[in-house]
Structures are given as structure tokens and as C-alpha cells.
Image: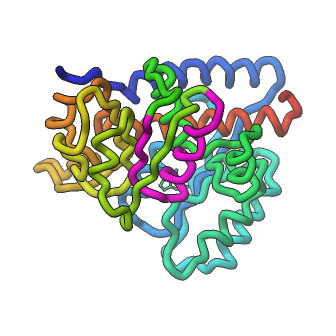
Amino acid sequence: MSAKIISGVETAKAIREELKVEVTELKDKHGIVPGLVTILVGEDPASQSYVTAKNKTAHALGIYSEQKTLPADTTEADLLALVDQYNNDPKINGILVQLPLPKHINEAKVLYAINPDKDVDGFHPVNVGKMVLGEQCFLPCTPHGILELLSRSGVQTSGAEVVVLGRSNIVGKPIANLMLQKRAAGNATITLCHTRTKNTEEHTKRADIIIAAVGVPKLVTADMVKDGVVIIDVGVNRIGMSESGKAILAGDVDFEAVKEKASYITPVPGGVGPMTITMLMKNTVQAAKQAAGLV
Ligand code: GUN
């Protein structure tokens, strides 16, 4: 059996078309243009390409966007002052501070300084708390994108054994939490494996769905999964450089071998990545509607 490919590119395109209509309507009926600012500190090439992609997508959807790039030696105080400036800027509905930040800046302090109503990343403790309680809030973009990929592909999650690999605040912890809730793409039984898990293979071998978010290229091999497994690969690992100078990417899953056993699988690139950016746009439109009292 060869797996069906879950295309993030196609799913993201469909959601972006829906968003384009919504943005046009907001402008025509209410005179509202949703606004997003991305703040990048330093020159990490991966982060640079992520924020550029976020701004390009915003522009394509008719969302106003600003891209702020600060030098790597920016002080924590200066970054906090900039966040505060955007907290008070009515043109801006969503503030995204690209992670990771340089070591001398306290990441939590900066994320906590963002107004929760403009926290389109869903990283502020107010939004994290509401997410855990199953209340209306900004969901973090990558887990939100994974839920959309699963439900729009018709994958059955209710009662499924889901194994999440990785316990990051951005992906592992929130996706584990969301999929155990009574919701679309939820109602699953969750096991979360991490670096201290004794026998990860024992868990992955009985999983109906594996969500890999560890940042280790091709960690999940064909002998670690059962026939018919559904694979969501969140890993974006740079494993080399092509002759034309483009990064060669690999996921956390050995795609070529595992796709022969899986029923569904996301590719890297073109799987979860495009969904993360799209859900950021969805959250920004949501933030604009909330700010205008339309929802
Ligand atoms: N770095 C890696 N993923 C993300 C994300 O979703 N949001 C932000 N702000 N930084 C990231």
C-alpha cells in the first residue's frame, strides 16, 4: 500500500480563498483592513524566510502587514517597548514575535507583554489557559493547522491512539491537549513521548496516528510504525544545500519508506508548513473582527 498524500499546499490554498473573501467583505462592508506585524530579532536564515513568507501571504490576502527586523544585539527593554508600541497601534490586530529570540532576551517576558487580544500566535498564557479549558481563543498556528489537515482529510480521530513525539510549547504540548478534547479532530487517546521516554518504538508501533515534532531528520522509520498509520510530520530539518544554494529539507519521518506502510502522510515540504502560515492569517482576521466588535 502507498499512502494518500495529505497536501498542506492544497488545503492551505482552499482556506486562503475563504479568507480572501472574508477580508474583502470586511473592507467593503465595514471599512476594516486586518493588520499584522512580524518582529524578527537577528539574522537566522530559517527565521528570516519564515517571516518573509508570513508577510507575503498577508499581502496576497489583502491583510496590511509590517515586517520589523531588529539587530541581534537589540536589548530586551527595546523589544518590550516595540511590543508596547504595537499593543497601542489601532492599525495592528496581530503581533508575532518570531522565535527563537537571542539568548540575552527572556522569551517568556516578551510573549507575556503582547496584548492577549493581539496574540495571533496563541502563545500568551491567557490564550494557552483558555485553550486547555476548551474556551474560545487564538489557537497556536501549527497545532491549529494540524487539526484542519486531519478533519479536512476525513481522518477518524475519535477513539484513535495518537502518539505525539516532542513536548514543545509550540507543537507537542498544545496538539496533545487539543486532540484529547471533545472537538473536531479530537476525542483521541493521547500518548506524548519525549527525550526521556523509555521505549518510544513500543508506543509508535501501536499508534493509529503519529504526530512527529522533534526536529530530528528521519527519526521515525518504517519498522517503528504499523500498517495503515496516519503520519503528520511537523519536522523541517535542513539536511544540506542544493547546487543552486537552496536548503534541502527533511521531515522527522523517513517519508519514502514510511509512505509504503501508512494510509495517509504529510510531505516535507508542502505538508504542515503552509498550514501554519495560513492559520496565522485566520487568527489575524479573527483578531480584526474581535477588535471591531463583529464577533
Ligand atoms: N518559530 C517557529 N515556529 C513559530 C511560530 O509558530 N511562531 C513564532 N512566533 N515563532 C516560531
Q: Is residue 148 visible?
A: no
User: Which residue appears at 64% of the width and 69% of the height?
Assistant: 108
Question: Tell me, what colour scheme is on the image?
Answer: rainbow
Q: Quadrant of the C terminus?
A: top right
Q: Is residue 49 above or below residue 259?
A: below
Q: Is residue 35 visible?
A: yes
Q: Is residue 168 above or below residue 7?
A: below
Question: Horizontal placement of 134 versus 67: left or right?
Answer: right
| Residue sitting at the far left | 243
User: Which residue appears at 27% of the width and 51% of the height?
Assistant: 201
Is 20 in front, or is 128?
A: 128
Question: Horizontal placement of 156 versus 110: left or right?
Answer: left
User: Which residue appears at 69% of the width and 33% of the height?
Assistant: 285
Q: Report the span colored magenta.
A: 161-183
Question: Horizontal placement of 209 versus 280: left or right?
Answer: left
Is 15 in front, or is 5?
A: 5
Is 97 in front, or is 2?
A: 2
Q: How many marks?
A: 0
User: Which residue appears at 78% of the width and 56% of the height?
Assistant: 115
Residue 89 is a magenta residue: no
Residue 178 is a magenta residue: yes
* Residue 120 x, y percent position in the rendering: 66, 46
Q: Quadrant of the N terminus?
A: top left
* Residue 34 x, y percent position in the rendering: 71, 36
